[in-house]
Amino acid sequence: MVKFSNPIKNFLLTIYRLVLPFGEPIKFLNAFPSYILFFVQMIKYSGMKGAEKIKIIDIAPQLHDKLSTTPFLRHYFYQDIWAARNIVQSKTNWHVDVASRIDYVGFLTSVTKVTFIDIRPLEANLPNFDSRAGSILAMPFDDNSIPSLSCLHVAEHIGLGRYGDPLDPMGTKNACKELTRVLSKGGNLYFSLPIGKERLCYNAHRIHSPQQILEYFSGLTLVRLSGIDDNNNFIENPTLEMLANSDYACGLFHFTKE
């Protein structure tokens, strides 16, 4: 196996990320041998007793799903469970989410009323669900008005223009300020984003240190810190040092306002 020095490796990774918007090169290369197997199996299937007729117009090759384990995005998987568990245990009768994953938001409607805020509103018809167009930088709520609030893997994107939002180098800080403003006294905020050595990966996201996030939420009290480390392990009560020295961990912050 060819081993590259760090500068060459970083250069190749940069080129790979620049090419990704046009399609994944690795999947493209893997598709060639996968197509051979696809056609071999299709011919075999069509000759089997009871097989349906295969029309050319209906052929839909799925070439990348033969995996030994079920893949999942670990940050999102663990954070959604973490937040949902806390929200259920709180027994709140109304929860507001700001631009988190829509699957998570949808599942929450089975246990409480949910208001979803995003610059791209979710046009879904569900019981216990209200979607409103709005910005995390100017939320349509009064001060101290929301008893249960979540914002998961969102604030790191604010101000980078990725989702059509205005450019703002202080985007994450200003988002945290607005979340603090609308949270009610005694209310709960469930907040997550990438944590580790501070850097900007333009225009995907920022990575913040845990101390930076605690400073951004200086008006709130940290109830509990959890996290997902670089090895994709969910950890209760990780040390700030461990998270700060990570490359791309996830900080799960439960705050309240006194």
Image (tube, rainbow, N blue to C red):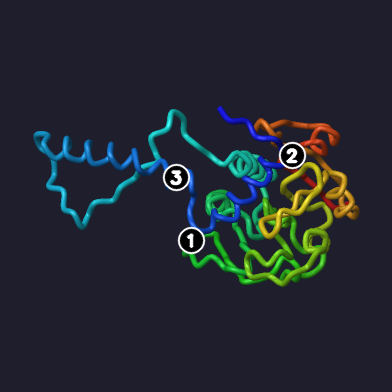
Of residues 160 and 16, the one drawn nearer to the viewer in this rendering: 16
Of residues 240 and 65, the one drawn nearer to the viewer in this rendering: 65
Check if mark 2's residue and mark 1's residue have beta carbons within 8 Å: no
User: Where is 131 relative to 65, above or below?
Assistant: below
Give the total number of marks visible in the rendering.
3
Q: What secondary structure is marked by label 2?
A: loop
Residue 27 is labelled as 3
Instruction: Tell us which disc is closer to us: 3 or 1.
Output: 3
Q: Residue at x 80, y 39 (%)?
A: 224
Q: What secondary structure is marked by label 1?
A: loop
Name the image quarter holding residue 86: top right
Q: Earlier in the sequence, mark 2 or mark 1?
A: 1
Report, in whole angstroms, how far the alpha carbon at label 3 lies from the one at label 1.
36 Å
Residue 84 is labelled as none
Q: Amino acid at mark 3?
A: Lys
Q: Residue at x 48, y 48 (%)?
A: 25
Residue 247 is labelled as 2
Q: Residue at x 48, y 64 (%)?
A: 124
Give the residue at mark 1: 126
Residue 148 visible at all? no
- State the residue lying farthest toward the left: 49
Q: Amino acid at mark 2?
A: Asp
Q: Is residue 188 left or right of residue 120?
A: right
Report, in whole angstroms, how far the alpha carbon at label 2 lies from the one at label 1.
39 Å
Instruction: Tell us which disc is closer to us: 2 or 3.
Output: 3
Instruction: Tell us which disc is closer to us: 2 or 1.
Output: 2
